[in-house]
Amino acid sequence: MNVGKKLLFIWVIAMFFITFTCALTYLVAQQSLRLSANALPAKLVKDVAINLQKGRSAQDSIPSQQVDASKSDVGFVMIYDQNKHLVATSGMFGTKKPSYPRGVLDYVAKNGEDRVTWQTPDGLRFATVAMKSNDYYVVGARSLHETENTIDQTTHIVFYAWLACLICSAVAMLVIHVFIKALLKKKYVENL
């Protein structure tokens, strides 16, 4: 195998490990950001569940601040009764009440809790945590707008880091190849 082929082989192996490392870095960062978006909804749900367990009404258990969820990144809470009808909410979509997927509440009825990304018909996305408390289903939600912006920025950073590694390593291999070729040529001339 000549020098050029050996260097190409080494470069391909190096790029495999660089690509794997960049992909793993992206995956860990993306999942950490997305999973951390559940923290506020989980806190809201637990606080409301405590209020319900103390005997407060659904309306008295939710945060008093009304949120326009179509514009705000502030978290909000929805409470559904046993029949999965909305009985209280601290979040609205303009003048419309939220309509959380019934299938998630069915899952919560069987399993006690669920954490999902909820996308509304108009494309808004929310990190949600739903759990059963007494005779109610409590859902905490928070917009994923900022989280997804941060994930997009992370994607660009990791991609440009990978691209820089690709270009710099290719240039380095080319320089090494030229240097080795020059050394071999010099050695060949000296041997004449």
Image: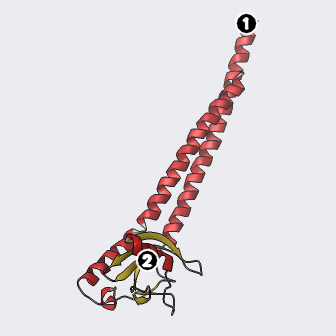
Pointer 1: what residue?
A: 191
Labels 1 & 2 near each other (Cβ < 8 A): no
Q: Position of residue 166 (x, y in %)?
A: 63, 43
* Above-or-below relation of 68 to 144: below
Residue at 58% of width from left, 57% of height from top?
A: 156
- For the point 42% across and 70% down, the residue is 114
Residue 60 spot, x, y in % from top left: 30, 90
Q: Residue at x 48, y 56 (%)?
A: 29
- The kind of secondary structure element at disc 1 is helix
Which amino acid, mark 2?
Answer: Ala
Query: For the C terminus, which image quadrant?
Result: top right
Q: Nearer the viewer, residue 100 or 188?
A: 100
Q: Nearer the viewer, mark 1 or mark 2?
A: 2
Residue nearest the viewer, comparing 125 with 161: 125
Name the image quarter holding residue 119. Answer: bottom right
Callout 2: 10 Å neighbours few (<14), some, many (20+)? many
Query: In whole angstroms, how far apart are the C-alphas of marks 1 and 2?
Result: 77 Å
Q: Which numbered tag is attached to residue 141?
A: 2
Image quadrant in which the N terminus is located: top right
Front position in the image: 155 or 172: 155
* Three-letter code for the amino acid on which mark 1 is drawn: Asn
Q: Residue at x 52, y 83 (%)?
A: 70
Residue 49, how many percent across, how many down? 30, 79
189 or 24, which lies in front?
Answer: 24
Q: Indicate left or right for 57 with 96 as reference.
A: left
Q: Residue 118 has which mark? A: none
Secondary structure type for disc 2: strand
